[in-house]
Image (cartoon, rainbow, N blue to C red):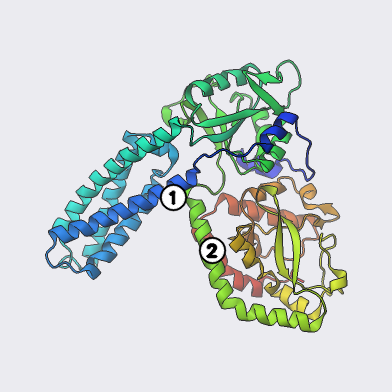
Amino acid sequence: MLEHAAKHSASGGSVRKLSDRAEQIIATPVGSTIPATVIVGVAQAVEAALLALLGFVICRLYVQGAQIEVYAPLILGTCLVGNVLFNVARTHRIAAYRSLLAQTSRVAAAWSLAVMLSILGVFLFKAGDMVSRVWLIVWLVGGIVLLVAYRLALRALVRRWTAQGRLKRRTVIVGGGKDAEALIEQIRQGASNDVELFGLFDDRVDDRSPEVVAGCPKLGKVVDLIEFARRTPVDLVIVSMPLSAEKRVLEMLTQLWVLPVDIRLSAHMSQLKFTSKAYSYVGDVQVFDIADRPISDWNLVFKWVFDKLVAITALILLSPIMLITALAIKLESKGPVFFMQNRHGFNNEQIRIYKFRSMKTDMLDHNAVKQVTRDDPRVTRVGRFIRKSSIDELPQLFNVLKGELSIVGPRPHALQAKAENQLYYEAVEGYFARHRVKPGMTGWAQVNGWRGETDTIDKIMQRVNHDLYYIEHWSLLLDIYIVLLTPLSLISKNENAY
């Protein structure tokens, strides 16, 4: 179903006029909630530090004459493996922090496995005589006690913040009428501390969808939600429709797929009863997971660190090339060294990217109305070389440092870029779904040969399909793989770059 939605999601380029109530919400400053990413990131870092500290303390107490250079790699390695296993067990999530038995049992099992793997490594490398077995056993048991105590304290803190409303997610409901009224009542009874409910979006305009439902205003149609979510942060969309209304649910998904939000289908209207494992929860309200924002929680931190480290390293290593390029541009033609252009960024926001100027000053095309073609007279001799080699894109490393771009992601396109005389978002349904993540300097489409000129609809469709594949399969390892492939692709797959 989601693949179908991705291929047929609604798109639109113009700004829609929203209702006065929606405009009022947009104009209201965002409240002082604590981002889930911050909580998860800090909780994970503190947990790893405590486990490592415990390992060193036990080493000092129980091992006579222990050499730090022997135990330090083992301690840090075990903590790293444990951290990975905690994430695999999905214990570093706000919902997991609220649980009791499920959370503590999973972290205890994951930590036990991490220590067992370390013990296996010790024997495989024949280092058993160098490492104390007593220390390993005490660290295993002490780590379990520490983790349980830490998670109980974390649970109490998260529940306190929840009660104070500091973890509320900005939420809207898709649907209306009696069904939405029942859902709103459930939210008020069991999830009022978890969500900040703004209102409803419903395509119906008859008596089944009044302007106010259980005190919540109708803010517009579903297509208005697209514009609303692009102008103010929205964390969660709950669809209030029965499972039997498959056609209507699919129609909603085809429009909502383009947004970087969590989408949940309310279970309150389902006549079927599933096991508790089939549901997730918004507070005490049972829901079905339909879609998650592509990169969230701790993964955002990983990607942010990766972007900054790669950008700084690349700027240092490539600065001689950038200086020579700037000098060559200045010597060949009058005008600025850099060229700036508006592009579509994350969540369809407009960003201004930097490039080395590759065209003659009097022929610059700021809106990219006409794509560059082979032997284009607008392109300078230096420009032809730097475009072919993608050196003209290097100034975008500054966009990465500013947080507007990632190193890897869907390439940002010019606002007026066209294929077969059609704007991209008009030519390809689901085009804006590629903006659910931050755009990048290079991407999965580029290393697979889909870079440069996109003069046909098939070319832009191939690029979008590769971008959607990247979004659905993102991992830090995939980013590293794409970065390593990029130099090779510039040599072997640049026949479309002019």
Q: Quadrant of the N terminus?
A: top right
Q: Residue at x 35, y 57 (%)?
A: 80
Q: Amino acid at mark 1?
A: Gly
Whichever of callouts 1 and 2 sits on the residue coming sooner in the sequence is 1
What residue does disc 2 label?
Answer: 308
Q: Secondary structure at mark 2?
A: helix
Q: Residue furthest left?
A: 64
Q: In terms of image quadrants, where is residue 222?
A: top right
Q: Residue at x 44, y 39 (%)?
A: 94
Q: Quadrant of the C terminus?
A: bottom right
Decide which of 126, 44 is in the foreground and name it: 44
Q: In terms of image quadrants, where is residue 333?
A: bottom right
What residue does disc 1 label?
Answer: 41
User: How many numbered marks does the figure carry?
Assistant: 2
Q: Amino acid at mark 2?
A: Lys
Horizontal and vertical percent position of residue 195: 53, 31
Decide which of 471, 165 is in the foreground and name it: 165
Relative to residue 41, is residue 170 depicted above or below? above
Horizontal and vertical percent position of residue 249: 64, 30
Q: Secondary structure at mark 1?
A: helix
Q: Is residue 115 visible?
A: yes
Decide which of 318, 31 is in the foreground and name it: 31
Q: Is residue 269 visible?
A: no
Horizontal and vertical percent position of residue 115: 26, 54
Question: Position of 323 compared to 52: left or right?
Answer: right
Horizontal and vertical percent position of residue 397: 62, 67
Relative to residue 134, is residue 15 depicted above or below? above
| Label 1 crowd (10 A; few <14 / some 14-19 / many >=20) | some
Question: Position of 158 compared to 104: left or right?
Answer: right
